[in-house]
Image (cartoon, rainbow, N blue to C red):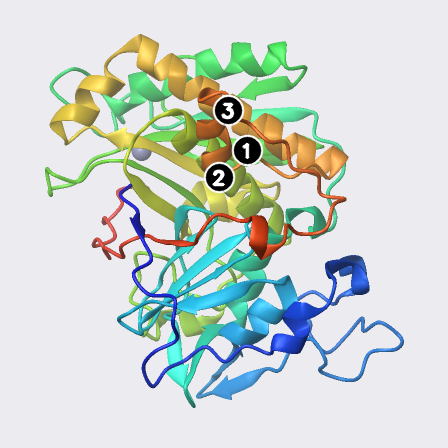
Amino acid sequence: MIAVRLRAFSIVGAISLTLACGALAKPASAKSSAAKPTPAKPAVAKPAAAKPNEDWQVIKVGPRDYLSADNIAKFYDLLGNVDATGKTVVLNNGRNQLQLTLDSREAVVNGLRNWLCFPVIAHDGKFLVSRIDLAKTIEPQLRPQMIQGKGKLQTVVLDAGHGGFDKGARSGYGSEKEYALDVARQLRGRLQAQGFKVIMTRENDVFLPLELRARIANQTRDSIFVSIHFNATSNRDATGFEIFSLTPRGAPSTADDALALSFLNMQAGSAVDAQSFELSAAVYHSMLGHIPEFDRGIKRARFAVLRLTKIPAILVEGGFLSETNDSKLVANPAWRGKLAEAISVGIENYRNVTEKKQRPMLAADYRAQDAGGITVLDLAQPPGRLESSPAPEVVPVSNPEPTSNPEP
Ligand SMILES: [Zn+2]
C-alpha cells in the first residue's frame, strides 16, 4: 500500500471537522473507558453521573442513524485533520487511526482498508458515519478489549474451501481446492504447536456441502471457524488479500450497492458479530504485516459458511489465481507456509485479546517487529498523547471495484 504524507493540516473547505477542544484537553484517565456505553447502545448503560447523550449525539438522516466525526474523535480521544481536498479526515492519537472519506464506503482503520456498510456523508458541515459502522466496524477495532461475551478459545475449525469435483478457482499451476487444503494442513500443525485443538472440515480431496461445514463448526465449543480460499476474477489485474466476516443485520454486503434496497429485509446477523469481526481484523493485520500483498480490505458478505456458523467465523482470500504474480506465489508451497504462519499468528493474537485482553498486533507492529523495533501495547495504559505520535498519514483512496466473489 502506498501512503503519502498529509499535505495540509489546516482545516479547510465548507465541510470542516469542528473539534471540541475541551474534550481533547482532558486527561485520558479522567473518565474510565470501561464506564462508557458502547456505541451500539448510546442511550443505555450510562455512568451514574453522566448526563443523557453526553457521549453520543445521534443524528438522524433519512432512515439511518449517524454519528459525527468530531463526536467519534471526542469519544476515542483522537485528534482530527481534514486533508487539502476537504474530503478526507484523519483521526489519530498515535495509538488508533481512522481515515474517513466523504461519499465513500472505503475507510482506513489502523493502517488497513476497511469497507463500511454505508458511505460517509456530509450533513450540516460535518462528516457523518453510520451508527451501524461505528458499532460493528470501528468500535471493535479501536477498543477490541471491550468486546463482550468472549470465553476461552480452545478449538479452531479449519475449513479448506471446495474439494472433490468442486475445484474452485484455477491458475495455470493448480487449483484452489489443493492450495486451500495445503494451507489448512500447514496451519493445523502450527496451531497444534500453539496448544489449540484443530478440527478439519475436510482432510482430503472430497466434496463437502457448505451446510455440512457449518454443522461441523457448530458442534464445537470454545471455538472459531476459519475458511481458506483463493480468488479469481475476470479482471486479470486484480490482486491481493481480502477477508470476510458476516454482514451485520440490516446492512448491505461489501459487494452490494450501499443504496440498493435489497438489504432492507433485515436478514439475520449473528450473535457473535463483534467476535467474528475482531477475528477477521486480527488475522488480516497479521497476513499483511507478514506478507507484502495488496490490501483489498476487511469486507462483509453473507457466504453460506459465514451465515450458517454460530461460532466466530471468517473467510480468508489468500490471493488471485487469475493474476500472474499471485498465482505464482500461491503455487509455491513455501509461500503457502508463510501464509499459514501469518494466519496462525493472527489467531494467536485473537486468543490473546479473548483471554488476556491483550490488544492484537497491527500490520505496522509486525512490520516494525521484523525491522527490530516492536513496541508491545498495553491495553491497561491510557491512549498515547498526540505529541508523541507520528504525523497522521493519508492513504490514497482508490475505491477499487469490489470483486464479484464466486463464494456462495
Ligand atoms: Zn473459494
Q: Which residue is mark 2?
A: 314
* Apparent side of residue 166 relative to residue 235 in the rendered image (left or right): right
Image marks 2 and 1: residues in contact by CB distance under 8 Å: yes
Tell me how far mark 3 sits from mark 2, CA to CA.
Answer: 26 Å
Q: Residue at x 73, y 60 (%)?
A: 28
For marks 2 and 1, the one nearer the N-term is 1
Instruction: Give the quadrant of the N terminus.
Output: top left
Image quarter for residue 16?
A: bottom left
For marks 3 and 1, the one nearer the N-term is 1
Q: Amino acid at mark 1?
A: Phe
Image depth: mark 3 or mark 2 in front: 3
On residue 107, which mark appears?
A: none
Q: Nearer the viewer, residue 400 or 248?
A: 400
Tell me how far mark 3 sits from mark 1, CA to CA.
Answer: 28 Å
Image quarter for residue 209?
A: top left
Q: Nearer the viewer, residue 166 or 312?
A: 312
Q: Residue at x 76, y 66 (%)?
A: 36
Residue 50, above or below 177: below
Q: Position of residue 272 (x, y in %)?
A: 63, 49
- Secondary structure, mark 1, is strand
Image-quarter location of ligand 1:
top left
Q: Which residue is mark 1?
A: 225
Q: Amino acid at mark 2?
A: Ile
Q: Residue at x 23, y 48 (%)?
A: 403
Q: Is the CB of the residue bearing disc 2 within 8 angstroms of ligand 1?
A: no
Q: Which residue is mark 3?
A: 369
Image depth: mark 3 or mark 1 in front: 3
- Secondary structure, mark 3, is helix
